[in-house]
Image (cartoon, rainbow, N blue to C red):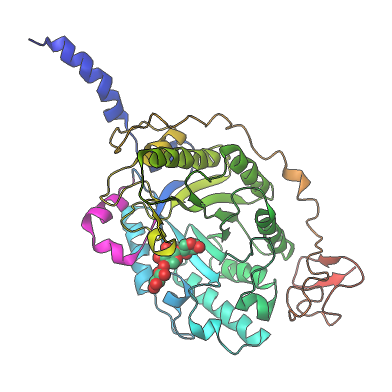
Amino acid sequence: MVHFSTIALALASVLPQLTNASGLNTAAVAKGKLYFGSATDNSELTDTAYLAQLSNTDDFGQITPGNAQKWDATEPSQNTFSYTKGDVIANLAATNGQKLRCHTLVWYSQLPSWVSSGSWTNATLLAAMKNHITNVVTHYKGKCYAWDVANEALNEDGTYRDNVFYQYIGEAYLPIAFATAAAADPDAKLYYNDYNIESAGSKATGAQRIVKLVQQYGAKIDGVGLQAHFIVGSTPSQSAQTTNLAAFTALGVEVAYTELDIRMTLPSTSALLAQQSTDYQNTVAACVANAKCVGVTIWDYTDKYSWVPSTFSGQGAACPWDANLVKKPAYDGILAALGGTASGTSTSSTATVTSTTTSATTTTTSATTTTTSATTTTTSSGSTTGVPLYGQCGGLGWTGSTTCTSGTCKYSNDWYSQCL
Ligand SMILES: O[C@@H]1[C@@H](O)[C@H](O[C@@H]2CO[C@@H](O[C@@H]3CO[C@@H](O)[C@H](O)[C@H]3O)[C@H](O)[C@H]2O)OC[C@H]1O
């Protein structure tokens, strides 16, 4: 016969885990973050089990529309705006009491052909871009915690991606986009968002150059979004990410992981799932360690709806929930980084998850080394020949040469620049 006290003892060892278990968002907020969130898409919302979990604010305090606010969705033909899909997700966030990260205004991809293949001049594309930003941001005014104003403006080597905006407007399309968004919704946080900027390197340096460029134009930029589309086993270390976040926040902006997922070559194995858990934990811990990292968004929470298999052949299983909406070890890895208590419901052991949150005191010590040139840039000199008007030494309103050949290109706190 089993004595009652034996049962009570057994229960006592289990109950703290069950009763104290916290979700990802609850744990993130307890750590001083604003949210832990997920991307979603309209077609997924008819799945009631999916929707119930997405709406669980214990796990998700923020959502991002994966496609509904992109240019091809919101302005499919010029000056005809469509907000139906975006509104569904914005309303869902409001109903659930979740923050909305709005995504995205100016991006080379998912552009309607009237933009990507239009017959533009500098002035006409500038007007179209400003019209798009003003309309979309005004429509969602007061609803977006943040806007990804510009997405993926950089090549891997940190130079500007050759998109239609850069071709016709030059680098100043970036500060002009930020200024236009700020005018339409002064309270939304305005972000530059990109991938492969999660550890130090040419592209991260390029993103820092964009932050400084926007600041030098006198336009508002509040944050940098690090997409963090990672690969299991190749994810940057926690310390590399912590150091990198500090280089961004040293510029006076906040940061967020905006599209975190960690894919693997299929089929998944318990070893890959364990490594994935460690990789998720390291990234979330890097955010925890930086006071100006406001939150983490995963790029959908379940393998059922992940964008990965259709984009990266042979790869998948990138999310913390599997295709049956069951938590994977990655869930407990994230929770461990957030200091939460494991629910014990994931599909395999968390024993391989290492505790790596000890560098919480690493902050912004390298701040001053990169901000001293706040009023000076040399990016235009020699590198922008052929790009018309904006973004060069000799920008808006300047009637002098269109490239800086005699000195350093300096921006004053307006739209003008000079060779000095
Ligand atoms: O057929 C298209 C389909 O390809 C499209 O897929 C979306 C593509 O964008 C994905 O989000 C991006 C992922 O990486 C970053 O680079 C970007 O910032 C994100 O916007 C999204 O998840 C996919 O669903 O969807 C529309 C279909 O018509």
Screen quadrant of the N terminus: top left
Please state if 218 lies on the left or on the right of 380 as rendered.
Answer: left
**Residue 56 position (above or below residue 82):** above
Task: Indicate the position of residue 230 as horizontal and vertical percent values.
Answer: 50, 51
Q: From this viewpoint, is residue 5 visible?
A: yes
- Residue at position x 45%, y 77% from top? 72
Task: Indicate the position of residue 298 as horizontal and vertical percent values.
Answer: 43, 51
- Residue at position x 22%, y 14% from top? 9
Q: Per the image, is 373 magenta? A: no
For residue 203, what is the image quadrant? bottom right
Decide whether the magenta segment is chiefly helix, strand or loop: helix
**Residue 240 position (above or below residue 146):** above
Please state if 411 lies on the left or on the right of 128 as rendered.
Answer: right
Specify the segment rendered in magenta: 39-57
Q: Residue furthest left?
A: 1
- Residue at position x 38%, y 53% from top? 98
Q: Per the image, is 51 magenta? A: yes
Q: How many marks?
A: 0
**Closer to the camera, 233 or 350?**
233
Task: Indicate the position of residue 70 as horizontal and vertical percent values.
Answer: 46, 71
Q: From this viewpoint, is residue 55 visible?
A: no
**Closer to the camera, 343 or 383?**
383
**Residue 256 position (above or below residue 155):** above
Q: Residue furthest right?
A: 406
Q: Tell which quarter ligand 1 is in.
A: bottom left
**Closer to the camera, 108 or 79?**
108
Screen quadrant of the C terminus: bottom right
Task: Indicate the position of residue 366 as horizontal and vertical percent values.
Answer: 72, 41
